[in-house]
Structure formats: C-alpha cells, structure tokens
Image (spheres, rainbow, N blue to C red):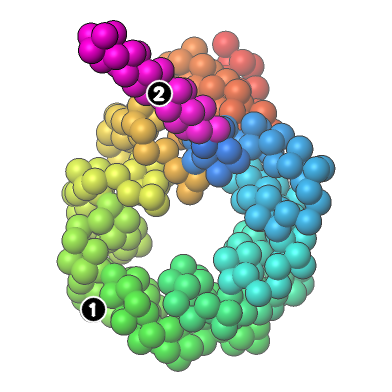
C-alpha cells in the first residue's frame, strides 16, 4: 500500500507540474503576442491590427490609443499617429507619458512641414513636453526631450539655451548621463567643441559605458568631421551590452550615411536582427530596410530585394522599403 501511495503522489505531482507548465506557456505566449511586445519585435502590422481590435471592443482604452500612436510613429504616419495620441491624452489627461508621445509626434510632423505649419506645431511640441514634465517631474525622457526642444527651437516658439541649462541642472540629480548629454549639446551650440567632447565622455562614464552614450560621442565626431574617431566610438557602442535604445541600429545607419565601413554596418544590422533584444525604438523592419540599403550599395540587388521584402512583411505600409524595392526591381 505504501508503494501504491507513493506512486499516486508522484503521479499527481507530475499532473500538477504539467498543468503549471501549460499555464505558464500559455501566459508566455500571450505576453509575446501583446501589442507592446509586437512593437518591440518590429511586427508593426500585427500590432496595429491587434490594437484596432482592442479599441473596437474598448474605445476608451487610453493605453491602446497610445500604443497605436507609437506604432504609426515607427512608420512615419504622423497624422494617424497624432489622432491616436490625441485620443490617449483626452482619455487620460494626467498621464505624463501620453503627453510626451503627443509632443514627439508633433515634432516629427513639424520637421517634415513648411515654415508656418512647423511653427504652429512647434508651439504644441513645447506645450506637450512642458505638461509632461509638470505632471511627472521625474520623467527623465520628458525632461531630456524638453531640453532638446529648448536647444533647437527659436525663441519665437519658446526655445532658449537658458531653459535647456535649467533642465540639465535638474537632470543632474535624476540621470547624470542625460545631463552631460544636454550640456554637451549646449557646448556644441556655442562652438566649444573641447567642452562638448568632455561632456559626452562624462556621459559615457556616468552611464558605465552604455551603447547610447558611445553613439552620442560618435554623432559628435561626425558633426566635427573626425570620422576615424567616429568609427572608433561606434565600435565601442557595438561592444557595449545591448540596451533598450537600439543604439546599434543607429550606429549602423550613421556608418551608412557617412559611407564609412559599410561592411561593418551590415554586420551590426545582422547582429541586431539575430538577437533577442529588438526594441520599439529600432524596429526590426527598419533594420531590414537598412541592411537592404547596404546590400544594394554593394551591388547585391537580389539580397537587397529580399531584405526590403522582409521589411514589408512586418510593415507593409513602410514607404521607404516600397520605394527601394521598386528601384531594385527596375534595375534588374
């Protein structure tokens, strides 16, 4: 009887473990297919379809509206994204993050607009960023974006270096690396390149060598025409542990735009696409598109076309990939 009892306990234990494993696997699969995860994987078409379905059932879901805005943001569909972000803000007026994203997408549209429209949108950008900071003074991304706005915008729409300096002082206690970055940008504006480089290197030290901080130094070297040092900084960014910024994709794009070490840009993009660390800030469809650009430059039209198709399989409305694929097909 004792033997039978022990075998029964073992049998029940096995069933319990199996059920638990099934529940965990279902939960994991569900998490992997949620809109936020889909965006991180660059599966933007699936993310949009899922979000539209969720909004159809729950039209007052502010988080779904915000995620939909961000999905359109990655595609460069500013008007659709603005509409979704505005709905998110209307539904939850006290959410700092939602105001931040509305400001960001206003800013992207402003960059692509004529002077009068850009000036009107710039005022909205400032208003949303300032409100995001007001609602959550510890929102580091909001303070950083607001500081950048103050740096770049003319005074007529609310810009000002003194305002950027004030944000840098506050950021110093919240995120020293971001504060050093803002101070570096301020020094660049003043043409004080020695101080700028010191600030960017201080950001690297404060962030313990983050990929994004090394990338910012590389961007600075590009601005001042020190391309060999730009490449060295990019190598440091690539060697750093991958983070949530997708810096390695931006590093590859920097090499492509400057036409420096194009094979390395392809390596970085393949490394990113084969990793488990794809992020919303650097969507996989964009990485496929950039890799296609590299392969096209190298004369491998067929492989380039394959990458453009891979991009469109994730984001069928991504216009740059459509244009590139049409170009390659005409040349074949």
Q: Nearer the viewer, residue 180 or 160?
A: 180
Q: Quadrant of residue 125?
A: bottom right
Where does residue 222 sit, x and y in percent of width and height? 32, 57
Where does residue 159 sit, x and y in percent of width and height? 56, 83
* Camera sees residue 9: yes
170 shown above or below 329 = below
Q: What number is the disc on residue 325? A: none
Q: Is residue 21 left or right of residue 52?
A: left
Name the residue located 29 percent from the left edge and 14 percent from the top edge. 5
Q: Nearer the viewer, residue 318 or 176?
A: 176
Q: CA distance from mark 1 to mark 2?
A: 63 Å
The main secondary structure of the magenta stretch is helix
Who comes first in sequence, dot 1 or dot 2?
Answer: 2
Magenta-colored span: 1-30
Where does residue 231 sit, x and y in percent of width and height? 23, 47
Q: Is residue 37 magenta?
A: no
Where does residue 120 sit, x and y in percent of width and height? 74, 74
13 shown above or below 124 = above
90 shown above or below 154 = above
252 shown above or below 29 = below
Quadrant in the picture for the C terminus: top right
Name the secondary structure under disc 1.
Answer: helix
Q: Disc 1 vs disc 2: which is toward the camera?
A: 2
Q: Is residue 166 left or right of residue 49?
A: left
Provide the residue designation for mark 2: 16
Q: Is residue 82 left or right of residue 103?
A: right
- Marks 1 and 2 close (CB-CB < 8 Å): no
């Amino acid at each position: 009887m004792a033997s039978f009892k022990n075998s029964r306990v073992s049998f029940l234990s096995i069933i319990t473990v199996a059920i638990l494993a099934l529940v965990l696997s279902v939960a994991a699969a569900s998490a992997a297919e949620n809109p936020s995860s889909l965006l991180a994987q660059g599966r933007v078409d699936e993310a949009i379809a899922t979000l539209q379905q969720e909004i159809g059932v729950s039209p007052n879901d502010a988080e779904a509206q915000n995620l939909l805005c961000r999905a359109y943001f990655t595609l460069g569909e500013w008007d659709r994204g603005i509409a979704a972000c505005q709905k998110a803000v209307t539904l939850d007026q006290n959410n700092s993050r939602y105001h931040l994203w509305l400001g960001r997408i206003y800013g992207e549209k402003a960059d692509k607009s004529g002077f009068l429209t850009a000036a009107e949108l710039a005022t909205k950008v400032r208003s949303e960023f300032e409100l995001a900071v007001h609602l959550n003074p510890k929102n580091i991304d909001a303070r950083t974006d607001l500081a950048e706005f103050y740096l770049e915008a003319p005074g007529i729409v609310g810009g000002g270096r003194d305002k950027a300096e004030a944000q840098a002082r506050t950021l110093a206690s919240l995120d020293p690396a971001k504060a050093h970055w803002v101070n570096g940008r301020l020094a660049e504006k003043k043409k004080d390149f020695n101080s700028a480089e010191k600030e960017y290197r201080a950001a690297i030290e404060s962030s313990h060598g983050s990929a994004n901080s090394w990338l910012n130094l590389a961007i600075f070297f590009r601005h001042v025409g020190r391309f060999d040092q730009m490449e060295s900084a990019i190598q440091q960014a690539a060697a750093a542990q991958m983070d949530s910024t997708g810096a390695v994709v931006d590093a590859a794009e920097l090499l492509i735009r400057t036409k420096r070490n194009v094979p390395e840009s392809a390596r970085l993009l393949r490394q990113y696409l084969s990793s488990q660390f794809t992020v919303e800030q650097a969507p996989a469809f964009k990485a496929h598109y950039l890799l296609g650009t590299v392969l096209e430059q190298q004369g491998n039209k067929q492989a380039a076309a394959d990458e453009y198709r891979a991009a469109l399989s994730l984001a069928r409305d991504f216009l740059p990939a459509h244009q590139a694929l049409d170009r390659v097909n005409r040349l074949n």
